[in-house]
């Protein structure tokens, strides 16, 4: 009796398991070539050098032998969406070249140090929520990085950040001839002695969130903190009253020196 | 900095960073040595305050200067206007000095070529033309003139030449606001200030898009929402804009609908009996236009008469006229009827560039007065300006064809007498007939002399009429080929205006000279020269003084005061006259300070009291009236006419309109009948054309189109179309079309549902692009009182180009 029940139970379970997997399949055979697609191995199209993302159209006769499906960029973006955990303790050692490339890219988006960066992508929707969706916490996708806002939420993002040209006008040459040379970004703060924490060489106004550049998973390569687990930056790094537009003072006000009466040299002991 | 430090800097290859930190000057420090020729030599970066060069908001920036060049800009945290923030134009304002095509040498047209000449020759040519025919000379100026520049031009023309043909571009921008204030309060300029934006519960934007045009002020309101406050924004407009995106309610109106809407609100306040009876009884009168010849003063009407006239503007009738649903008019009526909330109205060009500009300005003031939403922080009818010193230089200095400094007019003998006394001129020096306003001035300049065009020489400073005048073919381009007309243009870059100029003068710009501006909230601001102008570019104020002195040398009697001395004479401590007309000596003294101290005398008659120059050096601007206190300090005024803040209000009155046109301390609540716009769409020209601005560019783009980040963001003007209209006409995104009106054409790419979204039957074109002049199409018809043309509505058609150009 027991034995029959066990066999029966096994059958039921096997059927259930098989049924489950049959049930979740859509029954449609997978088309060939969807993955890995040879579209991915296509070199950037040189038919449209102005826009490598454009692919040549196919004729009907070519279609049967051609791979169809998502392009590399599309797949890459999709695949990496669930972001990896950021490891605070990964040792950060950017190379000199990485640092230079990173700061060059950073500088290319600012007219001078302290200017609000331009928006390096087209803006169709200027609703603040649209900006905030990516830039509140930052997003990193292959070849694409949305940086974290360095300042508190302010309404009307495009008030300060100039976007790219609107979609219909992007082919227009907007070159401007100017001799304006902007202030370069400071390279590093001052150290009182080797090993001392450097001072903050820039204004903290609109840069209250140090992690936007110096830490977290979305900092700028070469500017990332070597110790992102420390959270109170100004505990060790002194800001500049000058750059932070603190109330003016030419000299640091001090109390008058102590009025010390010094005994005359050679004067004898009290009589 | 000592040598040791220098070595340190070099050795560490961090010069920029370290010198910023180590520099002995701090950001807010003001230049200690006032107005001397050169800034103190500072190794590294120095910072100094200046108001932004662009709009009328009047933000303060900190300008970072290194090796004699502007290299950085920061929002000024000490400035009350912007509290450390700027907009995208302000952040890049430093670059305006460095476009590659700056004008650096006077250029004279010989045949169809421009040849370089020396300044002496240029000044002599101008002086000679004026000397030969002083009455046919006109001076066209600007709301971008600094206060001393405007004051010098004013004194030169009205005092020196006895010629009133001086008018500014601000005629095209806010003269209806002026007439609205005069008609209502008897004196110009807003009673409230920007603090209203921090305190209002409801903000109403009347045909106004501050999200793009006054972004610092608009985000001051929307940032309150981020802080958890509730602000209701009601946008009344003819197209959806970025302001609409932030608005709680969007009320789409037909062009001229604003007149009907304001009448509808007043009708409801009366009908529902929830207007502020005690305020109206104590502080207001009613006024209407005279039946035969309407004047700015109008005639007194009784409250009964007012009720009778407004009775027909029921919500349903207003809906018919304005297109705004009756229930929305009722909503506005109830809002204004609620005295527990604070309501601020904002407007700018929508209500000013209007053939009923004076009427709609007066009516919106009337809505606030009738409902008592006036004079408490947050309760204010607030008119904004578009130029940095439209208020300071045009409205206060009075550089208009009919005006004299300090709220005076040329038609009043006692006002002329004041000016002649202040200026130490012979009695009768000032002409009593108002000069030509802008449209007339250009009509007479472009009409052949033989046909009665009696302006033959025109000097244009700090503005670009070749792009901004309406109906350009008629008012500007027709100057071409007229042999005896001579156009002199002082500019910083080549513009549409310099294309027809016979003589071009290279001008110094912004922090290349000393200056003072006056912003939209009565705030007078001051800055010092920080860098040298390029090449031979020179100050506009110096040009005026140099021309005047040349005339003085030629023996022109008007350039002498009563004692026979030069009217702009400045003497040193030994009583010796300083040769400020020679540019190398212009900065031997602070000419701005001398002119401002002279101008200050004019300011008390209309209680627009100004403080001494040195007080403005210390402050980030001060809002007039600025009154000296018992302890010798100077106090600014945030709220005019309100007893709690305005020192000129009689104690116990609560409110007092002490320049009332009815001489009884009361403001006027006006009634104006609705009238349709002068040109409406018809069979041949079926679309409305509205012109305006975008966030990234300022006015004619002369400055902003030379800034990389801004030009990249908005590289071209465009025509904004409703998608249904585009579909019906088979017009595609980006396609080039031609806009045609009865007056001219303009070719533009189409942006369907672009930055703004116009309703069906309306197109919108920004005017910043000098290669696409939409003012070829606009209408020069103007308001009867303010003479301000209507750029916001005329009839056009959109024509597809036969040959479609495939976008590359």
Image (cartoon, rainbow, N blue to C red):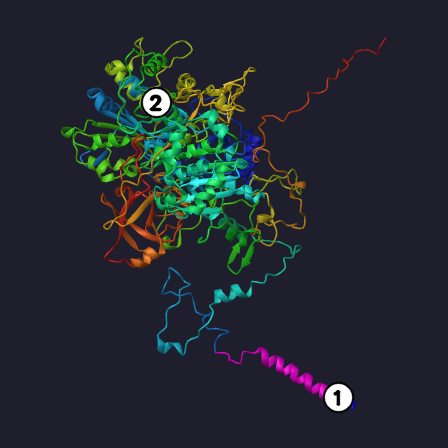
Query: What is the quadrant of the C terminus of chain B in the image?
Result: bottom left
- Look at discs 1 and 2 and give the one toward the viewer: 1
Question: Where is mark 1, residue-wise?
Answer: A5
State the residue lying farthest toward the right: A271
B551 left or right of B263 in image = left
| Quadrant hosting residue B268 | top left
Q: Secondary structure at mark 2?
A: helix
Q: Do we see residue B532 in this rendering?
A: no
| Quadrant hosting residue B211 | top left
Residue at 37 percent of width and 61 percent of height: A49
Question: Which region of the structure is painted magenta?
Answer: A7-31
B756, above or below B153, in the image = below
Front-most of residues B393 and A105: B393
Q: Looking at the rendered structure, which numbered label has been put on residue B779?
A: none
Front-most of residues B44 and B468: B468
Residue B423 highlighted magenta (yes or no): no
Measured in 3D between alpha carbons, the distance from the residue under mark 1 to the one under mark 2, in whole angstroms, is 112 Å
A249, above or below A226, in the image = above
Front-most of residues A126 and A57: A126
**Residue B109's x, y, as percent?**
21, 33
Residue at 56 percent of width and 63 percent of height: A80
Q: Chain of mark 1?
A: A
**Residue B647's x, y, as percent?**
51, 20
> Could you classify mark 1 by the number of other residues whose Cα lies within 10 Å: few (under 14), some (14-19), or many (20 or more)?
few
């Amino acid at each position: 009796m027991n034995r029959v029940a066990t066999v029966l139970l096994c059958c039921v379970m096997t059927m259930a398991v098989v049924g489950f997997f049959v049930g979740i399949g859509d029954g449609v055979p997978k088309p060939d070539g969807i993955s890995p697609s040879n579209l991915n191995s296509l070199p950037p199209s040189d038919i449209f050098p102005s826009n490598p993302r454009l692919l040549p159209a196919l004729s009907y006769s070519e279609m049967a032998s051609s791979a169809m499906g998502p392009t590399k960029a599309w797949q890459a973006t999709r695949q990496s969406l669930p972001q990896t955990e950021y490891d605070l303790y990964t040792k950060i050692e950017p190379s000199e070249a990485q640092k230079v490339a990173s700061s060059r890219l950073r500088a290319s988006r600012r007219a001078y140090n302290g200017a609000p960066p331009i928006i390096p992508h087209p803006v169709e929707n200027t609703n603040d929520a649209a900006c905030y969706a990516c830039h509140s916490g930052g997003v990193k996708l292959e070849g694409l990085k949305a940086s974290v806002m360095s300042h508190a939420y302010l309404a009307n993002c495009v008030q300060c950040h100039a976007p790219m040209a609107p979609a219909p006008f992007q082919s227009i040459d907007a070159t401007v001839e100017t001799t304006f040379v902007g202030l370069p970004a400071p390279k590093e703060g001052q150290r009182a002695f080797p090993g001392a924490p450097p001072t903050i060489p820039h204004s903290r106004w609109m840069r209250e969130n140090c992690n936007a550049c110096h830490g977290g998973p979305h900092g700028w390569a070469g500017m990332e903190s070597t110790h992102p687990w420390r959270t109170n930056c100004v505990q060790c790094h002194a800001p500049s009253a000058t750059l932070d537009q603190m109330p003016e003072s030419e000299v640091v006000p001090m109390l008058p020196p102590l009025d010390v009466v010094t005994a005359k040299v050679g004067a004898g002991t009290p009589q | 900095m000592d040598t040791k430090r220098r070595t340190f800097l070099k050795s560490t290859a961090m010069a920029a960073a370290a010198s910023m930190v180590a520099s002995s000057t701090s950001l807010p420090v003001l230049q200690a040595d006032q107005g001397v020729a050169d800034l103190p030599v500072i190794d590294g970066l120095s910072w100094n305050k200046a108001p932004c060069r662009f709009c009328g908001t009047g933000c303060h920036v900190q300008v970072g200067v290194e090796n004699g060049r502007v290299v950085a800009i920061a929002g000024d945290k000490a400035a009350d206007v912007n509290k450390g923030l700027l907009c995208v134009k302000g952040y890049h304002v430093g670059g305006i000095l460095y476009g590659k095509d700056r004008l650096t040498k006077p250029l004279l047209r010989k045949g169809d070529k421009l040849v370089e000449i020396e300044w002496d020759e240029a000044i002599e040519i101008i002086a000679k033309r004026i000397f030969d025919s002083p009455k046919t000379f006109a001076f066209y100026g600007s709301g971008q003139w600094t206060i001393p520049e405007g004051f010098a031009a004013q004194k030169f023309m009205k005092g020196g030449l006895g010629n009133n043909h001086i008018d500014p571009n601000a005629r095209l921008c806010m003269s209806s606001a002026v007439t609205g204030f005069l008609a209502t309060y008897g004196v110009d300029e807003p009673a409230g200030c920007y603090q209203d934006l921090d305190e209002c519960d409801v903000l109403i934007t009347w045909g106004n898009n501050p999200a793009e045009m006054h972004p610092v002020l608009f985000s001051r309101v929307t940032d309150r929402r981020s802080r958890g406050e509730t602000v209701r924004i009601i946008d009344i407009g003819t197209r959806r804009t970025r302001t609409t995106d932030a608005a709680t309610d969007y009320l789409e109106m037909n062009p001229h609908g604003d007149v009907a809407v304001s009448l509808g609100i007043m009708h409801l306040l009366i009908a529902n009996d929830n207007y502020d009876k005690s305020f109206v009884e104590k502080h207001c009168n009613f006024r209407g236009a005279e039946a035969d010849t309407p004047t700015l003063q109008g005639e007194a009407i009784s409250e009964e008469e007012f009720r009778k006239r407004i009775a027909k503007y029921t919500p349903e009738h207003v809906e018919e006229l304005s297109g705004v649903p009756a229930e929305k008019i009722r909503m506005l009526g109830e809002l204004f009827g609620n005295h527990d909330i604070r309501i601020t109205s904002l407007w700018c060009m929508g209500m000013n560039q209007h053939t009923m500009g004076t009427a709609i300005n007066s009516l919106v003031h009337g809505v606030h007065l009738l409902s008592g939403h006036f004079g408490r922080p947050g309760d204010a009818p607030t008119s904004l300006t578009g130029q940095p010193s439209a208020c300071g230089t045009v409205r206060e200095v009075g550089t208009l064809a009919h005006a004299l400094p300090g709220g005076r007019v040329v038609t009043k003998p006692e006002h002329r007498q004041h000016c002649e006394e202040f200026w130490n001129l012979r009695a009768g020096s000032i002409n009593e007939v108002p000069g030509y306003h802008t449209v007339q001035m250009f009509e007479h300049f472009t009409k052949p002399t033989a046909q009665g065009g009696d302006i033959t020489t025109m000097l244009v400073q700090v503005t670009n009429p070749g792009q901004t005048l309406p109906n350009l073919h008629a008012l500007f381009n027709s100057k071409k080929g007229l042999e005896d007309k001579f156009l002199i243009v002082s500019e910083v870059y080549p513009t549409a205006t310099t294309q027809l100029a016979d003589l071009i003068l290279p001008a110094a710009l912004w922090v290349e000279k000393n200056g003072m501006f006056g912003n939209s909230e009565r705030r007078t601001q001051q800055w010092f020269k920080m860098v040298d102008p390029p090449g031979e570019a020179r100050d506009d104020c110096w040009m005026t003084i140099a021309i005047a002195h040349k005339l003085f040398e030629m023996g022109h009697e008007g350039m002498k005061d009563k004692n026979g001395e030069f009217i702009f004479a400045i003497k040193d401590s030994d009583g010796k006259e300083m040769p400020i007309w020679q540019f190398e000596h212009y900065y031997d003294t602070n000419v701005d300070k001398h002119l401002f101290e002279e101008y200050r005398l004019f300011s008390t008659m209309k209680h627009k009291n100004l403080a001494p120059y040195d007080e403005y050096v210390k402050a980030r601007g001060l809002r007039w009236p600025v009154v000296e206190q018992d302890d010798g300090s100077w106090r600014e005024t945030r709220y005019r006419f309100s007893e709690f803040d305005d020192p000129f209000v009689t104690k116990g009155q609560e409110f007092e309109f002490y320049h009332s046109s009815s001489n009884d301390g009361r403001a006027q609540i006006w009634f104006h009948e609705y009238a349709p716009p002068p040109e409406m769409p018809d069979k041949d020209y079926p679309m409305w054309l509205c012109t305006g601005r975008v966030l990234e560019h300022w006015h004619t783009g002369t400055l902003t189109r030379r800034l990389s980040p801004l030009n990249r963001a908005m590289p071209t003007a465009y025509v904004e179309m409703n998608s249904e209209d585009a579909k019906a006409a088979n017009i595609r995104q980006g396609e080039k079309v031609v806009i045609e009106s009865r007056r001219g054409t303009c070719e533009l790419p189409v942006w369907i549902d672009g930055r703004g979204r116009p309703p069906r039957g309306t197109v919108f074109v920004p005017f910043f692009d000098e290669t696409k002049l939409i003012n070829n199409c606009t209408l020069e018809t103007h308001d009867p009182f303010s003479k301000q043309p209507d750029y916001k509505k005329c009839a056009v058609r959109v024509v597809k180009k036969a040959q479609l150009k495939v976008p590359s």
